[in-house]
Amino acid sequence: MECQEVRQAHTDTITPHGKQPKDGKKPEPCKPILKVEYKTTRNGDPFIILSGGLSYDTVGRRPCLTVMHGKSTAVLEMDYPIVDFLTLCETPYPNDFQEPYAVVVLLEKDLVVIDLAQNGYPIFENPYPLTIHESPVTCCEYFADCPVDLIPALYSVGSRQKRQGYSKKEWPISGGNWGQGTQSYPEIIITGHADGTVKFWDASAIMLQVLYKLKTAKVFDRNRSKEDKGSTETSDEDPFAIQIMSWCPESRMLCVAGVSAN
């Protein structure tokens, strides 16, 4: 008597960004999915996180990371192409409920960490800025041997600024040791940007650290009349771009001139 083992497999097909075919038509063509991670949770709804997979008709769309949880699908746009991503979980053991709480996304020019435990999947505020060109830098000033109490004062004011769109939790990645700065005196760099932002940076340590952000667009916007839209292409594209800055560290007075004669 011979015994034969019969195995059956059930396959579920998911098209997160493609339209479901009807009347026997072929599925909508989509770009390849570059990476997928499947993480379990105690409440029964797993997280499916993937990069790529967008349909070809989304011309000009920025690179996206897709987060699928239960019946919801969130498409998170990134500023730069995605190199890789890693899901942070409460446990490293795959046979246990992993309970993912964040996703670390490595971009070509940035590092983004997404909070999976909060509605809307906000990002964590990065304490280690990787680029000063969040908005293109249009002018720059350097100040050495500043007053000792100036950097703590700027940091204190900047830490009280309301930051919208960020997670309320602390940066989830820890490790490493701070190195010693190369200078024994306080150094500050001020950058003016195309969107009208003025940023104060602490340049005393090994890496630049944002101390305070000043948004001049709100002030300049009130001064611009509806008829005066500027006479140059630069002012049309970036009407609040900073052109000239003058700052006195002793008196803490700052003078800013924009591209639209403000």
Image: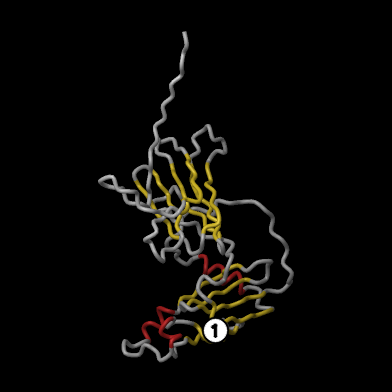
Amino acid at the residue labelled 1: Met
Q: Residue at the far front: name it.
A: 1
Q: Position of residue 81 (x, y in %)?
A: 51, 61
Residue shown at 67% from the left, 53% from the top: 176
Which image quarter is the C terminus in?
bottom left
Q: Position of residue 218 (x, y in %)?
A: 40, 78
Which x, y percent locates residue 180?
73, 63
Q: Nearer the viewer, residue 166 or 238?
A: 238
Where 230 falls versus 81 (above or below)?
A: below
Q: Residue furthest left?
A: 23
Asked whether 53 or 147 is in front, the reply is 53
Q: Is residue 106 above or below residue 153?
A: above
Q: Tell me residue 148's x, y (percent).
A: 66, 74
Does 161 sit above or below residue 124? below
Q: Is residue 100 left or right of residue 151?
A: left
Residue at 54% across, 77% down:
137
Answer above or below: position of 119 versus 93: below
Quadrant of res 224: bottom left
Q: Is 245 positioned to the left or the right of 175 in the image?
A: left
Residue that badge 1 annotates: 253
Secondary structure category for the residue under label 1: strand
The number of discs equals 1
Q: Is residue 1 left or right of residue 175?
A: left
The residue positioned 46% from the left and 49% from the top of the image is 50
Q: Residue at x 66, y 78 (%)?
A: 146
